[in-house]
Image (tube, grey):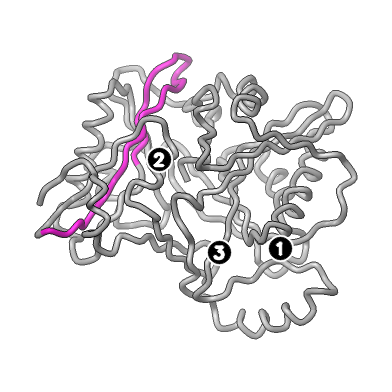
């Protein structure tokens, strides 16, 4: 088994390295990456390593290098992600070898710590986290809401596309949060980042919206049989009634990712509702099917934000809204390097 840096010609020799994820009760998707290093291109500095066996690429992992804030200090951290091993190569130490190589790369680049985000129900990765002493820091929920047209906006929602302008608006609110990366580096062109903001008096609410389509496509792999006749009924009455999207097996799902809200002032939460209505309506026009948003389970604003993010009462009644639970794992390399789960920034590029 050869563990080495990724090369473009590896694309011609890769095995089945798709990711299979359950995003809603009974709804499973197959995430197909455009290139082995496609997700890594969302970061300014990143390593991608592959495992080669008998001329085939049977595993891959990436490690992003970030200049962040940790324990009140500016430092460097590594983010390990995208670990995938072909079915025929599992239980042969491939994942461990890839993880060890990626972790060493972050150390060589001066990282004081490394972190990872893994699915909470992924039992196969738990022995790996124990072996490499990755400790659970917090639980993260990815909120999933099907896009549905909302009532007309009552508030003017402005948009901003320039990365520098977006960073200027967002940075002051999160500059003291752990794992926060300052500046426009957070908003690469591949992510198509847009800031949506609403203001009223001294209050404001803003979120970023981005696309990961340059890195991967989500194909619906399985849908419960009970949803199929409902889908036909949905399509019949959709011109008359606002309804959330129901996925169709074999079709690609278009998704937009929502960044952590910036809320300021007494009316901020009400403005956030207006911003999300605007985003839903914009997504309908663009043919987007789902909105996804990571949020810390320990965030005291969690339920209020979730209510604002939802596609509406009908979606909640039909359980169309859902959450995908994950674990944020952390490993310090330097004594005293810690992460505060109560002041933690979630980078949408990491999901």
> Disc 1 on helix, strand or loop?
helix
Q: Which of the pair 265/57 is nearer the observer?
A: 57
Q: Nearer the viewer, mark 3 or mark 2?
A: 2
Q: Which residues are magenta?
A: 55-80
Task: State the CA–CA distance, disc 3 to disc 2.
Answer: 21 Å
Q: Secondary structure at mark 2?
A: helix
Q: Is residue 54 above or below residue 166?
A: below
Q: At 40% from the left edge and 63% from the top edge, which residue is drawn?
A: 20
Nearest the viewer among 9 and 323 is 9
Reading the image, the residue beneath label 2 is 41
Q: Nearer the viewer, mark 1 or mark 2?
A: 2
Callout 3 secondary element: strand
Residue 95 spot, x, y in % from top left: 22, 50
Assess whether mark 1 and mark 3 are in contact (beta carbons under 8 angstroms).
Answer: no
- List the residue tagged with mark 3: 253
Residue under label 1: 316
Residue 300 seen anywhere in this rendered image of the structure = no
In magenta segment, residue 161? no
Residue at the extreme bottom of the image, as rendered: 229
Q: Position of residue 276 (x, y in %)?
A: 74, 47
Q: What's the magenta bit mostly, secondary-structure-wise? A: strand
As drawn, 293 above or below 173: below
Q: Residues within 10 Å of mark 3 (few under 14, many from 20)?
A: some
Taking the image as shown, residue 54 lies to the left or right of residue 350, namely left
Q: Is residue 59 magenta?
A: yes
């Amino acid at each position: 088994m050869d563990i080495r840096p990724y090369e473009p010609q590896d694309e011609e020799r890769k095995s089945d390295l798709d990711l299979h994820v359950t995003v809603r009760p009974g709804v499973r998707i197959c995430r197909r990456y455009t290139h082995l290093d496609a997700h890594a291109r969302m970061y300014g500095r990143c390593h991608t390593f592959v495992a080669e066996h008998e001329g085939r690429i049977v595993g891959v992992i990436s490690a992003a290098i970030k200049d962040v804030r940790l324990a009140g200090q500016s430092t460097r951290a590594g983010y390990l992600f995208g670990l995938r091993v072909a079915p025929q190569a599992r239980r042969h130490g491939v994942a461990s070898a890839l993880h060890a190589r990626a972790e060493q790369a972050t150390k060589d680049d001066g990282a004081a710590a490394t972190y990872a985000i893994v699915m909470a129900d992924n039992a196969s990765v738990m022995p790996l986290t124990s072996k490499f002493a990755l400790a659970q820091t917090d639980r993260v929920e990815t909120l999933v809401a099907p896009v549905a047209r909302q009532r007309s906006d009552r508030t003017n929602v402005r948009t901003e596309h320039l990365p520098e302008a977006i960073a200027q608006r967002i940075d002051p609110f999160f500059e003291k949060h752990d794992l926060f990366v300052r500046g426009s580096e957070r908003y690469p062109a591949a992510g198509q980042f847009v800031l949506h903001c609403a203001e009223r008096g001294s209050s404001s609410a803003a979120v970023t919206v981005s696309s990961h389509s340059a890195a991967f496509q989500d194909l619906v792999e399985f849908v419960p049989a009970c949803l199929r006749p409902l889908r036909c009924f949905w399509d019949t009455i959709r011109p008359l009634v606002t309804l959330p999207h129901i996925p169709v097996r074999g079709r690609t799902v278009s998704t937009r990712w929502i960044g952590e809200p910036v809320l300021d002032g007494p009316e901020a939460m009400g403005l956030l509702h207006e911003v999300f209505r605007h985003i839903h309506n914009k997504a309908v026009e663009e043919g987007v099917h789902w909105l996804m948003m990571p949020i810390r389970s320990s965030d005291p604003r969690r339920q209020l934000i979730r209510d604002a993010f939802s596609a509406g009462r009908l979606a909640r009644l039909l359980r169309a809204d859902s959450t995908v639970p994950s674990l944020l794992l952390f490993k310090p390399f330097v004594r005293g390097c810690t992460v505060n789960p109560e002041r933690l920034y979630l980078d949408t590029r990491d999901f």
